[in-house]
Amino acid sequence: MNRFVYIIPLLVLLVLGGFSIVQLKNVGDGNSVNILPSVLINREVPPFDLEPIKGYERGFGSKDLMGQVTIVNLFGSWCVACQAEHPFLMTIKEQNLVPIYGLDWREKNPDAGPKWLAKYGNPYTLIGDDPKSVAAIAFGVTGAPESFIVDQKGVIRYKQIGPITPEVWDETLWPLIQQLREES
Amino acid sequence: MRTFLFALMVAVIAPIATVHAVEPNEILKDPALEARARVVGKELRCVVCQNQAIDDSNAELAGDMRVLVRDRIMAGDTNQQVIDYMVDRYGDYVLLDPPFKASTLVLWIGPAAIAGIGLIWVALFYRRRKTQTGETEFVTAGPQATPLSDEERKRLDDILKEDQ
């Protein structure tokens, strides 16, 4: 018993250290989902209806997401990680894999979004302008880019925090999209 | 020099500590509604800066959340409805004061439990030490200690003399 008493602090230290290492490793592996789990998974897309960005005819709203599996991708011309993700979104569009709907978030200058898309290409089926974070807050967004996979019934099934990389696509998003298509 | 540095520190930090992030153009005309918005704004966490209320944060998203809080209050929501709206989208995380429930149990009980374990450990440690000291006293000055015999005393004197 007496010796055990002296071991307690060491055990506590080891347990705390173990937790820290696991958490750090999670963050290191990019599993930031663990930090902020989305409460919106398996719930309907929040109702919203956005104006088009400058020079585009149609904006988009939650009703546009019904009837097919879609990706809702939140981006901004000011967002560096969005630029990094962008070429892969173009690949998804070129190969016609799944329609991507864009939320153009917090553009200070209304020309910035259209200009960015003209320069790098437009991977989006429809784009909504969200200068005041109305849709972003409705989606519980904390940063850009974030992407949501929405099923045929308009239910959010997955939240991707950070860029869609080829690895994330192959391992998680594409298998999920195919699975959701089979569900209907 | 130290006084100067201290004064400098206070001069730099004080304005930061007292600054209010609520922007003038956000403030509602009705002071009663604005007061309610302030109450709500102090309970909601700025989701991009982690340890600040949206009222104290300069982050752009926090600003948009403040505007949304005011829009909903203007639309007739109660304070609780506004808070529920945010929790519905961001989870309990958006509350600066997290609720007491199963998933937050460790958060609430954890520190107290660790302190409790520590106290028990300290208590055991002192109890053990007390027993030890007790034993030592028993040996040196206890009633059963036998006085030196004449022969032993003589030998002790001899040894002491040799040293001198």
Image (cartoon, rainbow, N blue to C red):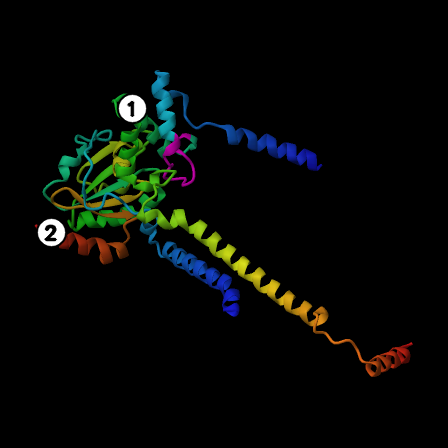
Q: Which residue is mark 1?
A: B73
Residue B33 percent coordinates (x, y): 34, 20
Q: Is residue A131 visible?
A: no
Determine whether, in the image, residue A80 is placed left or right of residue B164. left
Label 2: element kind: helix
Between B120 and A128, the one lying in front of the other is: B120
> Which residue sits at x=34%, y=43%?
B100
Which residue is the site of mark 2? Answer: A181
Secondary structure of the residue carrying tag 1 is helix
Q: Residue furthest left?
A: A184
Asked if labels 2 and 1 touch by Cβ distance under 8 angstroms, the answer is: no
Label drawn at residue A62: none
Horizontally, residue A13 falls left or right of residue B25, namely right
Instruction: Say which chain tag 2 marks.
Output: A
User: What is the distance, in whole Å, between disc 1 and disc 2 at their CAs?
Assistant: 41 Å
Residue at figure coordinates x 22%, y 41% from the top left: A122
Q: Nearer the viewer, residue A90 or A15?
A: A15
Asked if badge 1 and badge 2 are on a common chain, one would say: no
